[in-house]
Amino acid sequence: AQSVTQLDSHVSVSEGTPVLLRCNYSSSYSPSLFWYVQHPNKGLQLLLKYTSAATLVKGINGFEAEFKKSETSFHLTKPSAHMSDAAEYFCVVSDHKWAYDKVIFGPGTSLSVIP
Amino acid sequence: DVKVTQSSRYLVKRTGEKVFLECVQDMDHENMFWYRQDPGLGLRLIYFSYDVKMKEKGDIPEGYSVSREKKERFSLILESASTNQTSMYLCASRPNPLREGWQTQYFGPGTRLLVL
């Protein structure tokens, strides 16, 4: 069965310092993995996705994530946090056993950026 | 750009009322989804539809039904609203698996529903 664990419910960083949001997943098949961001009172926006191509994935706004199959992880990183990065971040896993695969969202990590 | 719109940003309803949440997408996507989002629980799938008039139950379908009469529109129905259905409701769409980029879901802005 699929599952997604986001290890931190809340992360706080200072502006200009690195960001690390952790995600571990379980999947029976070859998964696709995603990170979405949700700013207050806004819909979800896709940051980046892994779909069995390069394991290091670059997304928008300077974010990237590395798929590590041996560790079943897909951590999100950014070298230098900006105030506008403060938001809720969701890690998502999608199996491909079936054509209409199930999509599982993690519980979310709230990122605060301190000036 | 894909656009997914939801009929209301905020709704206030009374217990027992029938509630309709509408979602429209403009990219000819076959798959559409309804989720509810609650703090600490992430997004949970209520129903999804993989084509017109097709629907499948998600993880928490109880108390909800859906309608997909046209490809671009997917409606979520609360037959008799209850206070535990107070939540943020998010609609999403994506192409079918035969199309490039099918893995990505596109989300609407959400409807925040309060049931009194």
Image (cartoon, coloured by chain):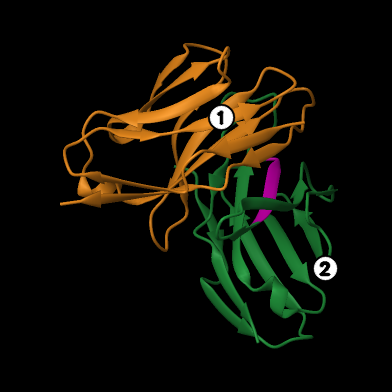
Chain colours: A orange, B green
Q: Secondary structure at mark 1?
A: strand
Q: Secondary structure at mark 2?
A: loop
Instruction: Name the disc covering residue B63, or none.
Output: 2
Question: From the viewer's perspective, is residue A25 above or below residue B26?
Answer: above
Q: Return the x and y of residue B15 as percentages of the image width and height.
A: 74, 86
Say which of B78 and B24 sits in front: B78
Q: Residues within 10 Å of mark 1 (few under 14, many from 20)?
A: many
- Measured in 3D between alpha carbons, the distance from the residue under mark 2 to the one under mark 1, in whole angstroms, is 32 Å
Q: Position of residue B61 (x, y in %)?
A: 81, 58
Q: Which residue corresponds to mark 1?
A: A24
Q: Is residue B102 visible?
A: no
Identity of the residue drawn at 63% across and 60% down: B23
Left or right: where A13 falls relative to A36? left
The reply to whether the C-beta atoms of the residues labelled 2 and 1 are less than 8 Å apart is: no
**Residue shown at 47%/11% (left/top)?**
A54
Disc number for residue B85? none
Type of the residue with mark 1 = Asn
Q: Would residue A49 be counted in the magenta stretch? A: no
Q: Quadrant of residue A81?
A: top left
**Chain to which mark 2 belongs:** B
